[in-house]
Image (cartoon, rainbow, N blue to C red):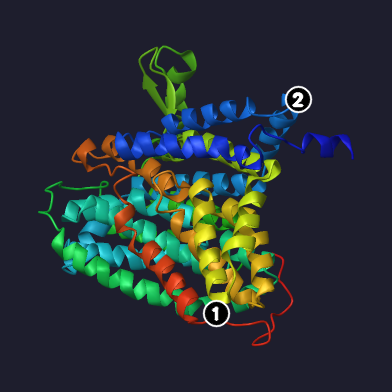
Amino acid sequence: MTDSDETRDLRFRGGRLASAVPIAFFVAWAIVQSGLLGIGDTTGLIVGMLLGLIFGMFLVVGNWKGYADVVFDGMTERVAATAIVAWLWAGMFAQTIQAGGFVDGLVWAADAISVGAALFPALTFLLAALLATGIGTGYGTAIAFTALVFPAGVVLGASPVLMFGAILSGAVFGDNLAPVSDTTIVSAVTQNADIGGVVASRLKYALVAAAFAFVAYLVAGSAMARQPIDAGNVGGPSTALGLVHLLSIAVVIVTAVQGRHIIEAVSWGLLISVALNLLLGLATPAEMVAFEASRASGLVQTMDAIPVVGAFVVPVEPGNTAVSGSLYTGASDFFPLIVLVLLIVAGAEVMQVGGAFEAIQTFLLERVATTVRRAETTMVLGTALVNAMITINTAAEIAIAPYIKTLGRRFNINGYRRANILDANTSALGYIFPWGGGLLAGYTSMTGLPEQYEWFTQSMLVNPASVWPYVFHGWFLVAVFLFAAWTGYGREYVSDRESKEVSRV
């Protein structure tokens, strides 16, 4: 055994399940903070995860250095970096479109075509699903739609909690179905199935759940509608002109569908949105990025002579200096969430190396999954359990994928079916639990709205613990797969259809 192997061999007082203490402590902390006390504070969740990692260290048998090395290894996992990149780019993009009056344009359009509070959540679900499917990131969709569409719906009188649930439902749909989604790729590759075949076989589940969700949003939208808010110009200096940013969004979707990386796709959309803001006068340069420098500075006093540079410099009183603008806030708002994600993935790595996942999987394999029906039901519930602990859905998929593969092969279940069970539940529940990465990404975007709109009060913020009943598509997707597992709907065996060579994107 090499030194590297030794540092990865963690033993805990209390056995393998004790390696789940850091994550279990965090989940309990999140339930108390968000669910029982109603505090939607991401930094507070960071403290909970930090304490969980500290408590876990005291359970380690032997040298603590190995534990610390595993924590660092987890924080450098690619799955965490993928989520972080999606948040940063999507945040800057959404804030820049917002600065250009897109929200005001949406309100104008909804009024022009008589889309009221009752219908708006259902349409939001459909549009969010379209964007998420196109760009392949539910996290990015949750960020963008919470910043842009959520306030428009609230102005029209739609229930804030229902609007947030509709956005998260659309994100679930795209994360589950998009061919370029990380969860789609991971689910296919880990089950030795081709991505195209997986997506095609997934439609019969996703569309059934989406149909039920759409009807649910129509019914709930009508029952929960409120009086519209008289907010004047909601999002910027224009009305219909803000809709020009539909072009920016279209550029992102088309570029992503063409197979370009999400960084490239969103970067093109960001550049287009900046150009439209400047060319059409929708936002000033300083509204997108501003250096708020002391007016006493000699350099600041000469900025008028350099118009191009001076457009980005805002003189302020000494002591109030800062950097601001849509690009700045779009990125900086997500810094606490980035730290939280790194710590959660580190906790998941401790569970993986410490053997908690293996212990759970062994129990399920030997004691629970004794028939094909019970095996598939166990797959569904097992993925749900892991996602409850690891709130980054791609990381949850990677952790549970070997179990799904082993169990599926034991009962000769086709790779497409295994991939669909794996992806659906990790995609859905990551946007339902109050500590889920997708939900917190949208909530983080929401917390900046009171500063951007005078009419948006703190009471309109949706507590992460209150939205879970309204993520209709997520719940219906889980229900569809439980129904499929119990009845055999859509079940395929290896002999029914052969997967093509796996596309390792």
Q: Is residue 462 above or below residue 46?
A: below
- Is the residue under label 2 in contact with that under label 1 (CB below 8 Å)? no
- Residue 209 visible in the current orientation: yes
Q: In this view, does 439 lie above or below 218?
A: above
- Front residue of 143/435: it is 435
Location of residue 495 by image quarter: bottom right
Q: Nearer the viewer, mark 1 or mark 2?
A: 2
**Labels 1 and 2: the sequence-earlier one:** 2
- Front residue of 274/319: it is 319
**Helix, strand or loop under label 1:** helix
Q: Which residue is drawn at 66% across and 41% down?
A: 16
Residue 381 percent coordinates (x, y): 50, 61
Q: Which residue is drawn at 39% across and 77% down?
A: 208
Would you call the spot at circle 1 few (<14 residues within 10 Å), some (14-19), or many (20 or more)? some
Q: Say how many tags the image has.
A: 2
On the rendered image, what quadrant is the N terminus found in?
top right
Say which mark, if any, is on residue 63: 2
- Front residue of 168/482: it is 482
Residue 450 percent coordinates (x, y): 26, 37
Q: What's the residue type where badge 1 is placed?
A: Ser
Q: How far apart are marks 1 and 2 (CA)?
A: 48 Å
Residue 310 percent coordinates (x, y): 44, 29
Residue 82 percent coordinates (x, y): 60, 49
Q: Which residue is drawn at 66% across and 47% down?
A: 78
- Residue 448 visible in the current orientation: no
Q: What's the residue type where badge 2 is placed?
A: Asn
Say which mark, if any, is on residue 201: 1
**Helix, strand or loop under label 2:** loop
Would you call the spot at circle 2 few (<14 residues within 10 Å), some (14-19), or many (20 or more)? few
